[in-house]
Amino acid sequence: MWGANFLPNIGEEVAMVLFGIGFANLLFQKNLIKKIIGFNIMDAAIYLFLAEKGYIVGRLAPIIVDGVQEVERYINPIPSGLVLTGIVVSVSVTALMLSLTIRLYQRYHTLDLDEISALLRKEGK
């Protein structure tokens, strides 16, 4: 039923499912807050995927201890750095999206994207 690589790659598979859930939420929801939540689910899926790809069983964090400098003993620090940088950027982007959503709500008194579009078309005429 399941392939031989299903369980060893469960983290990547969960990340793909989460990304699909976030993407569907981003596409099909009309409420702006729900769209932001979908965007954050997609972010979390990408971070999980990068963390899973960067981890190697049996290896240590790239901090030299006991004078051992062989590359085979340590994991690659690049995926971890990308995840940390992405989290910082994601928090800033989420804060900006939420602040713009608050401004839209104050002006149009709705969070429904279709209603905001209709109100914008009315204002343009």
Image (tube, rainbow, N blue to C red):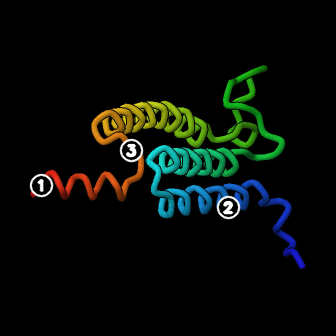
Local crowd size for mark 1, using a 10 Å CA cut-off: few (<14), some (14–19), many (≥20): few
Q: Nearer the viewer, residue 47 or 108?
A: 108
Instruction: Give the image quarter of residue 55.
Output: top right
Reading the chain from its start, which is encountered first: label 1 or label 3?
3
> For the residue marked with disc 3, what is the amino acid?
Thr
**Secondary structure state at the residue bearing disc 3:** loop
120 vs 81: above or below: below
Q: Residue at x 83, y 42 (%)?
A: 58
Quadrant occupied by the N terminus: bottom right
* Disc number for residue 114: none
Q: CA distance from mark 1 to mark 2?
A: 41 Å
Q: At x 75% / y 28%, what residue is drawn?
A: 68
Tell me which amino acid carries mark 1. Gly
Query: Residue drawn at (39%, 44%), measured in percent from left and top?
Result: 110
Q: Position of residue 35 (x, y in %)?
A: 48, 50
Residue located beneath label 2 in the image: 17
What distance separates the C-alpha of mark 1 from that of mark 3? Answer: 18 Å
Residue matched to label 3: 110
For this view, does 86 lie left or right of residue 118?
right
Callout 2, which amino acid?
Answer: Val
Image coordinates of residue 25 in percent, x first then y, are 55, 58
Q: Which residue is mark 1?
A: 124
In the image, 90 versus 64, the foreground residue is 90
Nearest the viewer among 82 and 25 is: 25
N-terminal-most mark, 3 or 2: 2
Q: Hey, which quadrant is residue 3 in on the image?
A: bottom right
**As drawn, is 61 to the left or to the right of 106?**
right
Q: Residue drawn 81% across and 45% down?
A: 57
